[in-house]
């Protein structure tokens, strides 16, 4: 028992160090500011669509109403009868001055349907600066202005927009949003502080066409589940600078019920374990609360150390959700952070097991290198 207590103590100490790094990383991120915009490069916005997500019309409207000199919006659906096409057409008529086109792609010939949609849109995009945004994102009216200012740096090839998760009406989406806004982004900022940005993450990525070509194009990404992560990884390996944009967007995660949300989060955990295996093991330090409770159970006399870890977690959560994201949700529902932390720890453990996922109603095998393939029916 003594050995186990000392081992857990070491993990708790590591998690406290991580929380301190998260606060320093938040300060470092907030210190960056985009330069004044002198060259407003034209931009193509690429948006894959599939059905009508919760809030889709307002999400799309936030892109149509951008206050920017020259941009176009390309949306892609698999079939012309997709309900999202009607939403697109309504907004195209509402904003006749915006160049907007709908592309019908047909069925994807490989596992990652999103990558196929992006590739189809890229083939007809007019401009070399590209904003790839999921259907569940919502942005401020000057989003394009901010990223265009950042891309005046000719060495910058790809940028990820950090996001503030906004839940729907379900309790489970509420927990997931709190986790994204207090835990997930902390890991991203710590990675940025310690080793620089050598990755990307959805739901909104900005890239130069030349950078995409240099990393091998979408054809190189088509078999990966976490295509956003490897897109940034490959771009960095190709010699381009990759960064975390100063433009924070909203990620509207909908109102999934328990089972759907569980499958979604488990898919994310299993994908992360294969995309960055060492980082996945290191996530044990990103969640101090379960470790602090375990230490308290093994060695009650060491309760001040458990209390210190819990306090460090609270301070780090405030730095990420409050300083960086200005998230009103976490400020109101702070008491759910411990519940989310325990759920997150359980999902992290579950991510070590299993090699199949369910995505948009279809089952896939996850391969050791992060690629995936359909489960063949017998």
Image: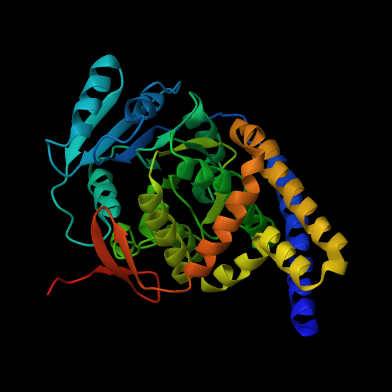
Rendered residue at 45%/71% (across/down):
274
Rendered residue at 61%/30% (across/down):
328
Q: Is 306 on the left-hand or right-hand side of 353?
A: right
356, above or below 41, in the image: below
Residue 94 lies, in percent from the top left, at: 28, 15
Rendered residue at 35%/36% (across/down):
44
Is residue 161 at all visible to an observer of this figure?
A: no
Q: Nearer the viewer, residue 378 or 301?
A: 301
Residue 203 quadrant = top left
Is residue 225 at all visible to an observer of this figure?
A: yes
Q: Is 346 on the left-hand or right-hand side of 320?
A: left
Rendered-image quadrant of the C terminus: bottom left
Rendered residue at 55%/56% (across/down):
343
206, above or below 284, in the image: above
Residue 221 lies, in percent from the top left, at: 33, 62
Residue 126 lies, in percent from the top left, at: 29, 37
197, above or below 302, in the image: above
Q: Nearer the viewer, residue 273 or 346?
A: 346
Residue 224 quadrant = bottom left
Rendered-image quadrant of the N terminus: bottom right
**Total numbered labels placed on residues in the image:** 0
Q: Is 118 on the left-hand or right-hand side of 178?
A: left
Residue 91 lies, in percent from the top left, at: 27, 21
């Amino acid at each position: 028992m003594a050995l186990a207590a000392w081992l857990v103590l070491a993990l708790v100490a590591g998690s406290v160090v991580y929380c301190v790094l998260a606060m320093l990383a938040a300060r470092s991120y907030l210190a960056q500011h985009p330069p004044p915009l002198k060259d407003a490069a034209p931009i193509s916005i690429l948006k894959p669509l599939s059905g009508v997500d919760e809030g889709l019309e307002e999400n799309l409207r936030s892109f149509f109403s951008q206050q920017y000199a020259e941009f176009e919006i390309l949306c892609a659906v698999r079939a012309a009868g997709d309900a999202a096409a009607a939403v697109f057409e309504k907004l195209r008529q509402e904003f006749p001055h915006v160049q907007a086109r709908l592309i019908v792609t047909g069925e994807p010939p490989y596992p990652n349907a999103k990558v196929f949609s992006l590739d189809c849109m890229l083939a007809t995009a007019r401009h070399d600066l590209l904003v790839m945004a999921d259907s569940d994102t919502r942005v401020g009216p000057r989003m394009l202005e901010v990223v265009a200012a950042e891309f005046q740096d000719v060495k910058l090839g790809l940028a990820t927009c950090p996001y503030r998760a906004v839940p729907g009406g379900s309790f489970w989406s509420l927990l997931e949003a709190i986790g994204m806004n207090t835990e997930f982004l902390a890991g991203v900022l710590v990675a940025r502080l310690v080793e620089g940005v050598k990755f990307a993450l959805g739901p909104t990525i900005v890239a130069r066409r030349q950078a995409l070509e240099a990393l091998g194009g979408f054809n190189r990404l088509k078999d990966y589940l976490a295509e956003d992560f490897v897109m940034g990884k490959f771009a960095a390996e190709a010699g381009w600078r990759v960064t975390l944009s100063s433009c924070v967007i909203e990620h509207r995660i909908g109102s999934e019920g328990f089972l759907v949300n569980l499958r979604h989060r488990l898919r994310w955990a299993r994908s992360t374990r294969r995309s960055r295996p060492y980082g996945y093991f290191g996530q044990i330090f990103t969640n101090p609360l379960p470790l602090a409770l375990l230490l308290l159970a093994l060695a009650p006399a060491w309760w001040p150390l458990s209390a210190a870890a819990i306090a460090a977690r609270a301070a780090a959560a405030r730095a990420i959700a409050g300083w960086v994201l200005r998230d009103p949700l976490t400020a109101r529902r702070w008491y759910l952070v411990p519940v989310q932390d325990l759920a997150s720890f359980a999902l992290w453990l579950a991510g070590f097991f299993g090699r199949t996922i369910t995505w948009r109603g279809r089952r896939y095998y996850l391969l050791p290198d992060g690629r995936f393939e359909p489960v063949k029916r017998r």
